[in-house]
Amino acid sequence: MAAVERPYPPGDYDVVVVGSGPGGLQTSYCLRRLGVRHAVLSRDDRPGGMFQRFPIFQRLITWTKPDAPVERGSREYEWYDHNSLLAEEPEAKALVPGLMDRAFDLPSRAEMEAGLAAFAERAQVEVRYGCTWESTRHEGEQIVLGTSDGEYRCRAVVFALGVTEPWRADVPGLEHAAHYVDTMKCDRYADRDVFVVGKRNSGFEVAQGILPWARSIVLGSPRPVQTDALALSALRVRYLHPYDEYARGGPGTYVIDVSIERIEPVGERLRVFTRGTTWDGALEFEVDDVIAATGFQTPLQDLPQLGLVTVADGRIPALTPYWESVSLPGVFFAGNASQGARGIGKRGAGASSSSVNGFRYNARVLARHLAERLNGHEPGREPVADVVSFLLRELTSAPELWVQKGYLCRVVSASDGTHVDEGVVPLATFLDSPGPDAFAASVEVDETGRIIPTLYVRRRGEIAEHQLDPHPLHEYESEPYRRHVEVLVGAYATRSHSAAPAISTVASTSSQVATRPSATTLSRRGANVHTSASSPRFDGG
Ligand SMILES: Cc1cc2nc3c(=O)[nH]c(=O)nc-3n(C[C@H](O)[C@H](O)[C@H](O)COP(=O)(O)OP(=O)(O)OC[C@H]3O[C@@H](n4cnc5c(N)ncnc54)[C@H](O)[C@@H]3O)c2cc1C
């Protein structure tokens, strides 16, 4: 039989992507669409990354709704399908819903893995499998990656390495515990007493998985469960079941605020010594198993030694808004690790960069950034005939803005009455960089969890922020909103032609004006658009 030729042999490329999980696949797809010469390497033997194994208890936390009020495969449908990767070709779009058995609106792990494999095949994303990145060095402007197959030289590298390497807290004796990644089968906890160290995502997932099997379960960690924050997180969908049992006084399941002082073997069992953090006292538990659900890290290899700055106890790279290392130029991250870019952090819960639904958009924006920076690629900039309708449509249904809340925005530049679509960019970049007069639409969240569509207007480097009042059905294309945005756009046009320095009366009563960095402290009342379920009313004059 003829040997199958492996793609991307060692050599020179503009970009090298490492990883064949959803982050690597999406990045490669987007780079290819823009004609960026690149290689993709993975130590795996097939596509899917982490979803080949995790979540251990086989059910995702991100939804896909196979039937929705919009057509499957349309741009609007992406908001209903948080698990498929993005493609232009109809045969590669929205693949996960077609593979679901609909037992749940959250796909199973196997359905997700199949969706990623189907994407790699139909979108023809090639990967050099079985190739491990081992070392990194700079040679002049070039980055050189040493791999199990030889050396790759590139102008930029995109690491889509995931965040699934076990991370253990510094607790004496925790080495006696299995980590989340080692638990695998829940029936092995049948009729056993289990202590789970950690009560965040993976802690609750493990506890939920073994709830029907274990004799007793204690989840312990210093910080209290933030039920208000969890109520807004994807986690609440399933994993809060153990917390619910505890909150209702269910025997045998406990969720406690303790620091773990040490863990000692006692014959076949383990003794966990704890001290209360939100209460006075100490408790000891003798259990059959301790599970360390203490989190994960990005497998950064030698990058920290090269000067890579990290956040979150060294677990995640610290990144610029375009997901480049803040300390190593040319070193970018995609996929789950793109959460290392915090954005403007203005208000409450926002972007979903650690999940497929969010980082698939980051990958598309990153690919365009790399194409422009490395190849001088000029993106097609379409004129916008009706800017008011365009902005309102984006605020109502752009999936990029609704998923990457407060992180990505849609920009329309304005010059002499002509409007041009500048595409989707990080909001922090729009606010921080000089640029032509422009509008930026973003969807943001306040500290109470209220979703607030927001329009920024940049004129001569000064930025004004205009918040629209929330609509209960999130519909912003109706008449009151149209009139309000018309006033903002009209005020711009008037000023633009007359070069009048002052902002119009309506804009100044309904908005805030500031230049960065003070934009993060803006807090005045939003626009004078009032809503009711049936007919929003415009009070702004
Ligand atoms: C327990 C758990 C549950 C999760 N549940 C969800 C969920 O329900 N929905 C969701 O959207 N997200 C979920 N996530 C987040 C999840 O990590 C991402 O959505 C997704 O898998 C990340 O994709 P990625 O491409 O960044 O990394 P991964 O899927 O982890 O892929 C990393 C790739 O990098 C490769 N790689 C790593 N090191 C090297 C090396 N040295 N050389 C060569 N290749 C290398 C790996 O082989 C792999 O191909 C979950 C995460 C965890 C930990």
Image (cartoon, rainbow, N blue to C red):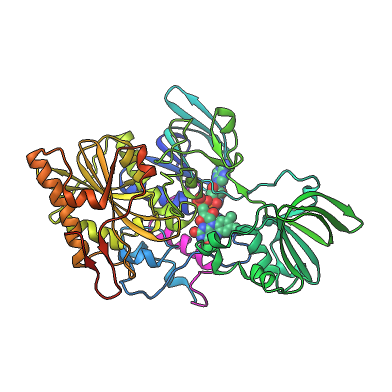
Q: Quadrant of the C terminus?
A: bottom left
Q: Position of residue 75 (x, y in %)?
A: 31, 62
Q: Position of residue 95 (x, y in %)?
A: 41, 66
Q: Is residue 123 magenta-colored?
A: yes
Give residue 200's quadrant in the image: bottom right
Give the left or right position of residue 489, taking residue 218 as reference. left
Give residue 532's quadrant in the image: bottom left
Q: Position of residue 372 (x, y in %)?
A: 30, 38
Give the left or right position of residue 459, taking residue 355 as reference. left
The residue stretch that appears in magenta: 102-128
Please determine whether, in this image, residue 387 is positioned above or below residue 154.
Answer: below
**Closer-to-camera residue (145/311):** 311
How many numbered badges does the structure rendering display? Answer: 0
Residue at 65% over, 67% down:
243
Farthest residue toward the left?
A: 498
Give the left or right position of residue 220, taking residue 513 as reference. right
